[in-house]
Amino acid sequence: QEQLRVITLKPGFATCGYNVDNPSPFIDVTGSLPSQSVVVRVHSFSINYADCCIRWGLYESANKFVGWPIVPGFDISGVIESVSSDNDSGLKVGDQVYGATFFGAYSTRVLVPSDQLRRVPRG
């Protein structure tokens, strides 16, 4: 059984983090974004025990709440590429951020609710 494979998203697409209302794990981000969300260009992500459990097929709630295919990864840092038109978080394009995606971090670009991110402190 295949546990992990690399896919390449078409230009203009991003992986969806958990808590984004979208029927697919991938989304076209060239148009309007879902409410209160941002697209982050991922520079770093962590590998946690939960990610290993997903790859082993042992994380049952991942299948129940996210479904397959699933993109592992919970924690990211990166730069904001775009924000939803109604975003009132104060985050803006070009901000360096870190936070939790709750799935989807093993990607170069991910759509995340803005309240799951924080600005990286200067210095």
Image: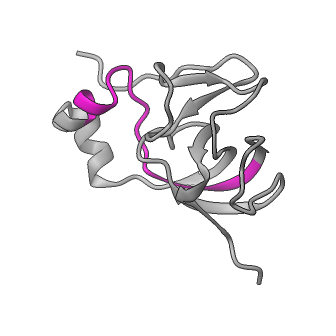
Find out whether residue 65 is within the magenta segment: yes
> Please, is residue 63 above or below residue 84 in the view?
above
- Residue 77 location in percent, x, y? 61, 58
Find out whether residue 81 is within the magenta segment: no
- Residue 119 location in percent, x, y? 68, 68
Q: Relative to the observer, which residue lies in front, 42 or 33? A: 33
Which residue sits at x=41%, y=47%?
102
Which residue sits at x=40%, y=38%?
72
Q: Quadrant of residue 65?
A: top left
On screen, residue 71 versus residue 110, left or right, reads left
- Residue 90 location in percent, x, y? 75, 63
Q: How many marks?
A: 0
Q: Quadrant of residue 60?
A: top left
Residue furthest to the right:
94
On screen, residue 115 versus residue 13, left or right, reads left
Structure colour scheme: one colour
